[in-house]
Amino acid sequence: MKYHHGNLKEELISSACIVCEADGHDRMSLRSIAKEAKVSQTAPYRHFKTKESLLAEVSTRGFTELKEILQNANAKKTLSTRDRFLEMGQTYIEFGLSKRNTYDLMHSPVIDKTQFPELLNSAVGAFEELVCVLAELNPGISAKDLDIKCIHYWALVHGLVGLLRNDSLAESEIDTKAGNAMGLVKSDLRSFLISALEF
Amino acid sequence: MKYHHGNLKEELISSACIVCEADGHDRMSLRSIAKEAKVSQTAPYRHFKTKESLLAEVSTRGFTELKEILQNANAKKTLSTRDRFLEMGQTYIEFGLSKRNTYDLMHSPVIDKTQFPELLNSAVGAFEELVCVLAELNPGISAKDLDIKCIHYWALVHGLVGLLRNDSLAESEIDTKAGNAMGLVKSDLRSFLISALEF
DNA sequence: TGTACATCAGTGAACGCGCGTTCACTGATGTAC
DNA sequence: TGTACATCAGTGAACGCGCGTTCACTGATGTAC
């Protein structure tokens, strides 16, 4: 099933991922994606009804990748549950820092997740990886307490990504408490996680 | 020192705050701010060199307000230190949820904080309110451990704001674990904070 | 197998829009004598 | 106190730009007979 280009739909999605990470989801244009894919600016409309539906694909890819790397971290069965949990936290934060613009898109309200079931599924999938390891780490925990723990640690790593990305504080020339503390955390993320996760 | 309008600079800043919260910082335009202030679209240029410098003022106001409400929460001297800390956490989260677009601007990279010292100061001011209460709550703690605790709790509430705002998960029609857990936390924020803050 | 036709992926020009910013201006306010 | 002038806040038209999307098209591919 090859027409002209071959597989432009796929090509457009990966171009969109590249452009999103390069320019940021609020500055990326459909035109720049088309250019990246080396097709005319109207070609995407053969495969995506709107710009939003293409962005939804980018977001879905992001969540799918996040889920996979979390699974990989949790799959290191030579490690203790505790160490796998730590590994997942670190993995999550590194993802958020290295793919910051994609991470932003994933958490941006510009895409209405309820209109893209596949996107919602991939987002929930990443969350459930956290549920698994926390259930293993806390045997016999009630469902409600497990839920609360999940949100707790999710909020912690999500928030940390947000703070660490804020270079103006982290790398502030001004010698402030906030700047100092941020540098401390950034330079030894693992130690921070250990103390924050209260082991 | 009243010309024509009187105090257009102030008026523009408060109009900008209104428009920012209404439209979101990435969708607000200088033109709409001018319209809100009932002046021509070029009038702002008499008081602000660029759009960015006006946005910096909005962000500064946000941090200043945040600092003030945190101070107010911490000033309720009839409460125990623990309860004041809880109060501050709740206050922070409620601010993030009720002024979500302003909160976004405050954490957005569109404004280079290092170019607006007053903005940086106000941001650091809010942070220092957290330092105060945590120092009081943990007498004799080392400076380094205090820093780490600050980042820890700041990340927690910051992350929670991010998650709770994500309505597609929180109010998801689909009956997912993530949706359930989020609803649980949202409906009783205080209980969640108590368990998350590990008292 | 060859031909006529239908389908459909990709093109290039054009649309209308909102934006930040510039510019020459007007007219009110402040000031020097 | 009155007048002439300088200052400067706010105006309205215009600029150039990039954007999402539409449209009529072209030309390659697939299909029926």
Image (cartoon, coloured by chain):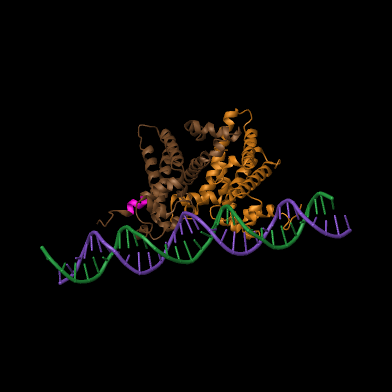
Chain colours: A brown, B orange, C green, D purple
Q: Find residue B76 and report its image quarter.
A: top right
Q: Is residue A10 magenta?
A: yes
Q: Is residue B140 visible?
A: yes
Marks counted in the figure total 0
**Front-lying residue, A45 or C20:** C20
Residue at the image point whose x is 53% and y is 39% from the top: A167
Give residue A147's position: percent from left, percent from top.
47, 46
Does D25 sit above or below residue A175?
below
The residue nearer to you, when weighing A112 against A7, is: A7
x and y, in percent, of residue B74 in the image: 67, 41
Is A10 on the left-hand or right-hand side of B77? left
Q: Position of residue B114 (x, y in %)?
A: 59, 39
Q: Which residue is drawn at the image coordinates 37% and 43% (left, top)?
A: A68
Q: Is residue A132 left or right of residue A161?
A: left
Question: Left of A103 or right of it: where is B191?
Answer: right
In the image, residue A33 sits, relative to residue A162, either above or below, namely below
The C terminus of chain B appears in which quarter of the rendering?
A: top right
Q: Residue at x 44, y 38 (%)?
A: A94
B129 with respect to A50 (left or right): right
Residue B69 location in percent, x, y? Answer: 66, 46
Give the prevailing secondary structure in the magenta stretch.
helix
Residue B173 can be seen in this image: no
Confirm whether the magenta stretch covers residue A66. no
Q: Nearer the viewer, residue B135 or B41?
A: B41
What span is in magenta?
A9-13
- Choose top left, top right, bottom left or bottom right for residue A46: bottom left
